[in-house]
Image (spheres, rainbow, N blue to C red):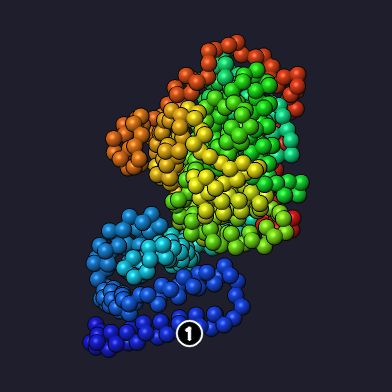
């Protein structure tokens, strides 16, 4: 079809050189203008990349040749060949049959995939240091995900068919959905009309038995005539609502533990407001975990309490335990973690956002406080899996005009919690960036944290596909704890891995009592067990919970009289918008 292919090759060669010349000119222009330091960090990264990439022109030239071949196939209507190439991809975004059957969409898809592969491979083969290559690869993938032809109405065959079939009403409904989401400040991942906190979510019977400016402490009603003597205190993450552990009755971890005869207490964190905008990590440890332990000890009459921390709640629990150690207070009987990372040497893809977030927080810190919008934190986590947690709903809600299906976990995921800036920046800087905890450099409330002092029995759960706490990093905790440690690896991700009810008997988990230095070596010899890990945890915990006693008929005590029914007030508060949070 193209008789003068050499002319096209020359043309594209000139195009590639012009592109690099343009980019270098842009960089020189940017460096002589005032610029947001956050933006400059990325410009500088790209400058270093191109300065050290000798094969830039060769790679781009090869890419253009591939595009010529694909373009020739399209014009020759070699649809079977194009479709065959497209069919090799298992990308869920291109599930609609038209991406294979229709020559135009087949070409569009394969062209996009070729470009994606080219850019990713280009980065991989560059001569930059590994850290820069990984950062480049991550942000290029973010860009490629955003420009996928599936994300645009005129280049998505499913959207076009929907517009034709509905006479354009699908786009009208999509605009309505977008207006509603703009009003709420986030993309709806589920039909929220199906759920209500205290209605069909977090309805396990209990009482709020203590309340201060930071927490409400919930005691759950016993479901058995006899209960284990030593109670369990659960510390959920302070950047999410606690009810991920008490969703509906069929998938509530709290209800399962109560049904096994445990007396369960749980912290409900307050979403940050003006009253606690200046709180620091030490307040979360002292007024949160340690105060809750004090109350549980008084109500139960037990000297030592079993504890369970989830995600960041596990980090706060760990630091609180070390503060207790420094005060010679032996209040903790065991310490369990769910998807908790104490060693942040490799925190996963979240590390690519650290420079950006710390720069944003820098000015706020100078003023001595403020509130970090939970919406921003939630958006950051969603960006780690953009196709699943952003673009999927962009297409469904706005381009197709559909309501997302009801799903309790996604309702919880959108129910954000605001955090004091000082706590958020401390977490990012001292844990994620400096990794101070495992270096014995972390100081909280005047006490240097020393993990070697932790000699409690410990149960550590991690999730195999966790994109927030990589399981290999969670496994590293085993080498810092001095007590008897059991490590269990569950299937699925950060949230679905934890919420795995025994009643459904889904998924599986891996166990291996012999702990070794290398997590992969541990996994290679681990035994796969079908079903929920909750049963395994209960079987472990029962031996640390003392004998059985008659269950109390009432909750609380004379000192701590029940204040209200669970789920309390703090869990019902809605997160501030980004603008509202910045105003405080």
Percent position of residue 211, x then y: 73, 33
- Residue 580, can we see it? no
| Image quarter (top left, top right, bottom left or bottom right) of the N terminus | bottom left
Instruction: Give the class, few, some or many, for how many residues have Cα within 10 Å of label 1's Cα (few <14, many ≥20).
Output: few
Left or right: 293 in relation to 93: right
Instruction: Left or right? Give the position of 263 relative to 279.
Output: left
Name the quadrant containing residue 362: bottom right
In the image shown, does 133 or 449 lie closer to the viewer?
Answer: 449
User: Which residue is painted at 60% across and 45% down in the image?
Assistant: 443
Above or below, 480 against 125 in this view is above
Percent x, y of residue 300: 64, 19
Of 446 and 470, nearer the camera is 446
Who's the residue at 69% across and 17% down the image?
554
Residue at x 45% of width, y 32% of height: 482
Name which residue lies at 72% across and 55% down.
368
Q: Is residue 128 left or right of residue 569?
A: left
Numbered-mark total: 1
Quarter that holds the C terminus: bottom right
Residue 380 visible in the shown view:
yes
Q: Is residue 238 above or below residue 37?
A: above
Q: Position of residue 237 (x, y in %)?
A: 58, 41
Q: Is residue 410 above or below residue 261?
A: below
Q: In the rendered view, would you say 464 is above or below 526?
A: below
Q: Label 1 belongs to which residue?
A: 25
> Within the image, what quadrant is residue 476 found in?
top left
Determine the secondary structure under disc 1.
helix
Where residue 427 appears, x then y in whole percent? 58, 49
Out of 280 and 21, give the one closest to the viewer: 280
């Amino acid at each position: 079809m193209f008789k003068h292919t050499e002319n096209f090759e020359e043309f594209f060669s000139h195009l590639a050189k012009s592109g690099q010349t343009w980019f270098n000119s842009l960089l020189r222009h940017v460096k002589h203008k005032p610029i947001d330091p956050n933006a400059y960090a990325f410009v500088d990264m790209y400058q270093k990349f191109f300065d050290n990439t000798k094969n830039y022109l060769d790679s781009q030239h090869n890419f253009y040749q591939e595009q010529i071949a694909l373009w020739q196939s399209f014009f020759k209507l070699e649809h079977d060949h194009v479709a065959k190439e497209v069919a090799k991809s298992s990308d869920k975004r291109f599930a609609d049959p038209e991406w294979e059957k229709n020559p135009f969409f087949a070409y569009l898809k394969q062209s996009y995939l070729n470009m994606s592969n080219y850019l990713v491979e280009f980065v991989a083969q560059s001569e930059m240091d590994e850290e820069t290559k990984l950062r480049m690869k991550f942000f290029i993938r973010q860009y490629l995900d955003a420009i996928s032809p599936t994300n645009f109405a005129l280049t998505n065959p499913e959207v076009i068919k929907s517009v034709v079939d509905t006479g354009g009403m699908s786009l009208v409904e999509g605009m309505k959905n977008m207006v509603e989401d703009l009003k709420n400040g986030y993309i709806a991942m589920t039909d929220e009309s199906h759920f209500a906190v205290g209605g069909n979510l977090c309805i396990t019977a209990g009482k709020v038995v203590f309340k201060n400016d930071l927490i409400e402490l919930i005691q759950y009603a016993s479901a058995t005539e006899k209960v284990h003597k030593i109670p369990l205190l659960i510390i959920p993450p302070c950047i999410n609502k606690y009810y991920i552990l008490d969703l509906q009755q069929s998938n509530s971890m709290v209800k399962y533990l109560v049904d096994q005869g445990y007396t369960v207490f749980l912290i409900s964190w307050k979403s940050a407001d003006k009253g606690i905008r200046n709180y620091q990590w030490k307040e979360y440890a002292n007024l949160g975990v340690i105060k809750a332990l004090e109350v549980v000890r008084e109500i139960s009459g037990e000297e030592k309490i079993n504890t369970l921390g989830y995600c960041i709640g596990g980090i706060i629990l760990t630091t609180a335990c070390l503060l207790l150690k420094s005060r010679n207070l032996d209040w903790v009987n065991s310490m369990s973690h769910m998807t908790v990372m104490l060693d942040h040497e490799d925190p996963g893809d979240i590390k690519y956002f650290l420079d950006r977030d710390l720069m944003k927080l820098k000015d706020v810190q100078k003023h001595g406080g403020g509130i970090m919008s939970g919406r921003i934190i939630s958006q950051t986590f969603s960006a780690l899996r953009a196709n699943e947690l952003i673009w999927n709903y962009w297409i469904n809600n706005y381009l197709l005009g559909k309501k997302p299906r009801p799903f309790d976990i996604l309702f919880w995921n959108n129910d954000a919690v605001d955090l004091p800036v000082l706590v958020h920046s401390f977490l990012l800087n001292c844990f994620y960036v400096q990794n101070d905890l495992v270096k014995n450099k972390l100081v909280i409330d005047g006490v240097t944290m020393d993990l070697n002092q932790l000699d409690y029995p410990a149960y550590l759960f991690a999730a195999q596909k966790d994109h927030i706490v990589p399981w290999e990093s969670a496994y590293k905790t085993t080498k810092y704890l001095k007590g008897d440690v059991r490590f269990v690896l569950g299937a699925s991700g950060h949230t679905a891995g934890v919420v795995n009810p025994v009643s459904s008997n889904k998924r599986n988990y891996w166990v291996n009592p012999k702990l070794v230095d290398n997590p992969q070596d541990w996994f290679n010899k681990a035994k796969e067990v079908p079903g929920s890990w909750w049963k395994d945890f209960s079987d472990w915990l029962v031996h640390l919970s003392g004998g059985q006693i008659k269950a109390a008929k009432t909750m609380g005590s004379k000192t701590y009289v029940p204040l209200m029914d669970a789920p309390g007030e703090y869990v019902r508060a809605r997160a501030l918008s980004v603008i509202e949070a910045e105003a405080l």
